Image (spheres, rainbow, N blue to C red):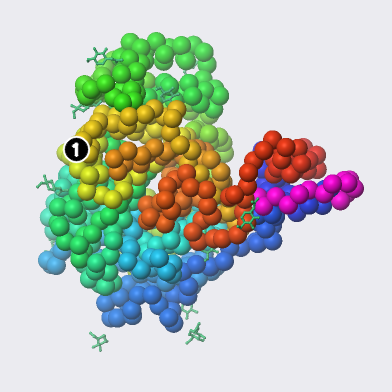
């Protein structure tokens, strides 16, 4: 509690910062620091402005019988006390046959003048997890995140940049209906379902000849590349003009490469967040060596790579004593019962989550309801009436397709304009070093892996910006490292768990600006393309600034006013 109070007060203290010098009659008033000015603006803005415009009168999408069937009244979303903007939602069949599966979507057209010829798709993973989680808690126009009082406007919604549709897929996920043929059991069928849905979606909303961008996270490390592959295969730019893809913390390789093998270096890296005892630490190190993990990492993390890797040790998770990843999770939960595998800096209490899944385990306090399971919500968003779960059972329980990094991803990179993979440093459900090992064993555009090591990669810069509300603060500055070779960009995101747009909304927003070609690279020091002002993106840091005017020292000077709770 104390830490949180301190943090909030530091940010609130921006107006106090200006007063402080007056109170002590300092001879030399603080020089104007654009970053401080930007932060001062926070306190003056209790709520963010609206985006996307009114949901009626002048609309972006023409109002026809076909589109009006899906229209959502943006002023009538339960518990949301502002207009979320023009949007369309409902079930769309995956073919023109009778009794076919239908996928549920929620589509927000953008007012951004650059968005005209674009459409971006967002997919959550699982498998079997709903993309409405992404809409409500990551990158949608309104957010209701765990532990928060009510829905708020999201200044970092990707709808600020382009037209976005969130799709629950494959059939059987969330509100989507599984009908007719048996459920999908591989990614070829998943992609075929999606392309069938997509054609009907494009026809309904008149979105022919748009550039298509596919994005997602987690198990969407399968979905995004396989759907892009199917779209490239279709050779039909009227419907399937896929240009670039972006996916976060993805499942792209053997499980053991993304969990057991990198797990001990990960725990070493974050050891003070884990607080595991020395006996246990010694034991997992001994076992990592004995199971062949330590030597495997040494071989796999070479830049450029030294040949193709063998099948990894313990590939079927059946070597006795080698399930180190599970053992670490169990040990972590003993020390920190609220430990979150999706964000390893999480501590108690377990928060209330309107989607019922605030961390590693499902949790719904007595009397609480699941937002999308409410009939008033379902009626407001053209959803079928009935039970809704964030991650439903029975979808893709078997997936016979190989992971994308061992199959389709190389040729998809070769056909795309851009392929961007981001990975949060605090995520342990899938570990960042595992993604690097996947890349190092992959051959695309004529060579294998990246040729230079992480120590030489560039800083990922997230612009200083105008903060719009205390309910939607987002960090900025150097936020990780990125590297690009032969059409593939990899970027790490600091201070972020598995759900990048949730934990690092401004970082994700910047990556989408790059995906859409609005900025030249991820190191560019410039304002967001949707804001302009003097926020300090051309501020030159010198040590002399620190004693006088840096945000850090100014906040420190106001610390003494904080109560010691
Ligand atoms: C939108 O329509 C309503 C009702 O017809 C009208 O009162 C309002 O002025 C219109 N708003 C705009 C911006 O045209
Ligand atoms: C739209 O729907 C209305 C009412 O159902 C109908 O009268 C009209 O013919 C339809 N228009 C078109 C173009 O289908
Ligand atoms: C949208 O919902 C608001 C709030 O319930 C209501 O006042 C308004 O009439 C609705 N608009 C339309 C077009 O149905
Ligand atoms: C629709 O398909 C399902 C199988 O998914 C079948 O059980 C059902 O009888 C079919 N309904 C009709 C009307 O054909
Ligand atoms: C794309 O085409 C190739 C070659 O025909 C095929 O092997 C692959 O399965 C197709 N991809 C998808 C996702 O359908
Ligand atoms: C990733 O692996 C390297 C070894 O190649 C190690 O030095 C580093 O600490 C690891 N990072 C994390 C976050 O696990
Ligand atoms: C590179 O690969 C060769 C052939 O497999 C092997 O002999 C050599 O030890 C490897 N070098 C390193 C640094 O791993
Ligand atoms: C590396 O790639 C080769 C060839 O594609 C594959 O056989 C091997 O299983 C891969 N190993 C890992 C650890 O990805
Ligand atoms: C050290 O951690 C392990 C793994 O959680 C646990 O089994 C063991 O009891 C711990 N030892 C002590 C002294 O707490
Ligand atoms: C979801 O709503 C249904 C009623 O439609 C109810 O039976 C069920 O218990 C609800 N599920 C949860 C987890 O609240
Ligand atoms: C999103 O758009 C709104 C309205 O145009 C704007 O005020 C806000 O700054 C934008 N957000 C970002 C991150 O640029
Ligand atoms: C940054 O750029 C803005 C706009 O070009 C300019 O007004 C401001 O003086 C610059 N600030 C610094 C610190 O150079």
**Left or right: residue 396 compared with residue 85:** left
Q: Is mark 1 within 8 Å of ligand 5?
A: no
Eyeballing the image, is 313 above or below 142? above
Q: Residue at x 53, y 40 (%)?
A: 478
The extreme right residue here reads 25
Q: Residue at x 23, y 22 (%)?
A: 307
Eyeballing the image, is 45 above or below 182? below
Could you tell me residue 476's position as x and y percent? Answer: 56, 46
Eyeballing the image, is 6 above or below 331? below
Screen quadrant of the N terminus: top right
Residue closest to the eye, 395 or 242: 242
Report which quarter residue 196 is drawn in: bottom left
**Left or right: residue 403 compared with residue 500:** left
Could you tell me residue 358's position as x and y percent? Answer: 47, 44
Could you tell me residue 204's position as x and y percent? Answer: 25, 72
Q: Is residue 543 visible?
A: yes
Magenta: main secondary structure equals: loop
Secondary structure at badge 1 equals loop
Eyeballing the image, is 553 above or below 280? below
Residue span colored magenta = 22-35
Number of marks in picture? 1
Residue closest to the eye, 52 or 341: 52
Q: Is residue 183 visible?
A: no
Q: Residue at x 45, y 27 (%)?
A: 455
Q: Residues within 10 Å of mark 1 (few under 14, many from 20)?
A: some
Could you tell me residue 171's position as x and y percent? Answer: 23, 54
Q: Residue at x 65, y 61 (%)?
A: 46
Q: Is residue 198 magenta?
A: no
Q: Which residue is mark 1?
A: 407
């Amino acid at each position: 509690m104390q830490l949180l109070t301190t943090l909030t007060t530091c940010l609130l203290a921006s107006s106090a910062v200006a007063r402080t010098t007056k109170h002590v009659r300092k001879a030399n008033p603080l020089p104007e620091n654009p970053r401080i000015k930007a932060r001062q603006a926070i306190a003056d803005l209790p709520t963010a402005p609206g985006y996307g415009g009114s949901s009626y009168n002048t609309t972006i999408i023409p109002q026809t019988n076909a589109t009006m069937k899906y229209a959502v009244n943006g002023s009538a979303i339960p518990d949301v006390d502002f207009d979320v903007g023009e949007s369309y939602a409902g079930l769309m069949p995956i073919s023109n046959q009778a009794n076919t599966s239908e996928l549920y979507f929620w589509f927000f057209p953008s007012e951004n003048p650059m968005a005209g010829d674009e459409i971006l798709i967002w997919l959550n993973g699982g498998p079997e997890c709903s993309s409405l989680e992404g809409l409500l808690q990551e990158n949608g126009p309104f957010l209701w995140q765990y532990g928060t009082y009510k829905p708020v406007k999201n200044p970092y919604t990707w709808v600020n940049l382009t037209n976005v549709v969130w799709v629950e897929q494959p059939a059987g996920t969330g509100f989507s209906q599984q009908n007719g043929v048996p459920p999908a059991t591989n990614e070829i069928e998943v992609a075929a379902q999606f392309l069938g849905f997509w054609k009907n979606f494009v026809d309904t909303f008149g979105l022919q000849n748009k550039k298509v961008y596919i994005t997602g996270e987690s198990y969407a490390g399968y979905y995004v590349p396989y759907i892009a592959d199917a779209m490239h295969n279709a050779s039909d730019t009227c419907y399937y003009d896929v240009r670039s893809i972006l996916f976060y913390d993805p499942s792209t390789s053997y499980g053991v490469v993304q969990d057991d093998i990198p797990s001990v270096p990960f725990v070493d890296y974050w050891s003070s967040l884990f607080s595991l005892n020395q006996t246990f630490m010694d034991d997992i190190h001994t076992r990592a060596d004995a199971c062949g993990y330590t030597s495997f990492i040494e071989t796999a993390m070479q830049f450029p790579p030294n040949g193709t890797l063998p099948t990894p040790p313990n590939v079927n998770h059946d070597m006795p004593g080698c399930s180190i990843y599970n053992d670490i999770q169990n040990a972590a939960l003993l020390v920190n019962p609220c430990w979150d595998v999706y964000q390893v800096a999480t501590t108690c209490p377990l928060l209330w989550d309107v989607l019922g899944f605030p961390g590693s385990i499902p949790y719904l306090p007595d009397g609480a309801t699941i937002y999308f399971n409410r009939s008033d919500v379902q009626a407001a968003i053209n959803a079928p009436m009935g039970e809704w779960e964030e991650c439903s059972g029975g979808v893709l329980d078997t997936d016979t397709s190989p992971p994308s990094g061992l199959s389709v991803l190389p040729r998809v990179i070769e056909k795309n304009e851009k392929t961007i993979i981001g990975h949060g440093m605090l995520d342990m459900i899938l570990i960042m070093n595992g993604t690097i090992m996947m890349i190092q064993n992959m051959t695309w555009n004529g060579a294998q892996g990246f040729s230079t090591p992480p120590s030489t990669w560039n800083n990922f810069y997230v612009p200083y910006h105008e903060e719009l509300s205390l309910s939607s603060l987002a960090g900025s500055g150097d936020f990780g490292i990125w590297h690009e070779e032969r059409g593939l960009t990899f970027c790490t995101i600091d201070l972020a768990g598995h759900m990048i747009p949730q934990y690092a909304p401004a970082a994700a927003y910047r990556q989408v600006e790059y995906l859409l070609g609005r900025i030249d690279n991820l190191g560019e020091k410039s304002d967001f393309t949707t804001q302009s002002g003097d926020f300090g993106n051309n501020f030159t840091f010198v040590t002399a600034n620190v004693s006088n005017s840096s945000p850090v020292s100014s906040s420190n000077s106001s610390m003494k006013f904080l109560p010691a709770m």
